[in-house]
Image: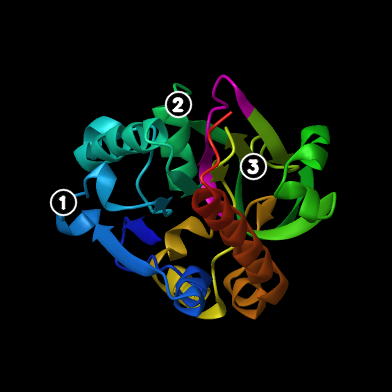
Amino acid sequence: MHIHYIIHAPFEKLGTIESWINKNQFSVSGTHVYRGEDLPAVEDFDFLIIMGGPQSALMLEKFPYLQAEVDLIQSAIAANKAILGICLGAQLLGIALGAKAEPSPHREIGVYPVEATPEASSDPLFKQFPGQFDVMHWHSDMPGLPDKAVLLAKSAGCPRQAFRYGDRVYGFQFHLELTPENIKEMVRHCQNELSPGKYVQKSEELIRSDLSGINLKMHKALDHLADCMQAGKSVR
């Protein structure tokens, strides 16, 4: 199986996704769109991962490569590829499915819980998670909920934290992939986003966060999507 990832900023990394790829010995390629690199053809990958970034999905016209990503996501959905959109990637996934991104009711930065929706209990991935569990947040916007998508998680600060479309397409507004090293990089580069807020932790708290259990959930999610792709299941 071949995985392709899209990265939006030099300080944004794959985090624990990289260790999962290495453990499974999958082939991998990536596009750093902020460098002007070209996106792949849809036939060149099996599993597409769209990472977060400082750009806003509310301003596609300011970042033309984001619209190109939306077009690629649409082609990947039509081709029954496995897709995971994280943070900005989840918002772009929602746009590709016809739902507009919106400002989140609250800016969320730090480790805070999300709550599973009733529909999550029958989701093949989310039924493996508790009804409430901690994740890492770093966002001001949120995805829209596309038609025929299933809302799987929400939080006190944001009503749309995770959704599924079909059986192999997921959007996570939150982060499961970030490692302590990633957090240090984001704190260094994004200090301007850490102004006080109801759901914003201080940089010292962020750096001390225990992310081990959160990272394990990332691996479970990736395992599930890889299994879906390898089993050749069709989108519902």
**Helix, strand or loop status at disc 3:** loop
**Helix, strand or loop status at disc 1:** loop
> Where does the image place residue 192, in percent across and percent down from the top left?
44, 59
Residue beneath the point at 27% across and 43% down: 42
Residue beneath the point at 44% across and 36% down: 93
Q: Quadrant of the N terminus?
A: bottom left
Relative depth, front residue between 212 and 111: 212
Q: Give the mark nearest the N terminus, 1 or 3.
A: 1
* Residue 211 occupies quadrant: bottom right
> Where does the image place residue 160, in percent across and percent down from the top left?
64, 36
Marks 3 and 2 in Cβ contact (< 8 Å): no
Relative depth, front residue between 155 and 219: 219
**Helix, strand or loop status at disc 2:** loop
**How many residues crowd around disc 3 within 10 Å: few (fewer than 14), some, or many (20 or more)?**
many
How many angstroms separate mark 1 from mark 3 (CA)?
A: 29 Å
Q: Which residues are magenta?
A: 137-149
Q: Amino acid at mark 2?
A: Leu
Residue 97, disc: 2
Residue topped by disc 1: 38
Tag nearer the camera, 3 or 2:
2
Q: Amino acid at mark 1?
A: Asp
52 is higher (above) or lower (below) than 18 = above
Marks 1 and 2 in Cβ contact (< 8 Å): no
Can residue 105 be seen at all in this image of the molecule? Answer: no
Marks 1 and 3 in Cβ contact (< 8 Å): no
**How many residues crowd around disc 1 within 10 Å: few (fewer than 14), some, or many (20 or more)?**
few
Relative depth, front residue between 189 and 23: 23
Residue beneath the point at 23% across and 53% down: 33
- For the rendered model, the colour scheme is rainbow
Q: Amino acid at mark 3?
A: Gln
Residue topped by disc 3: 161
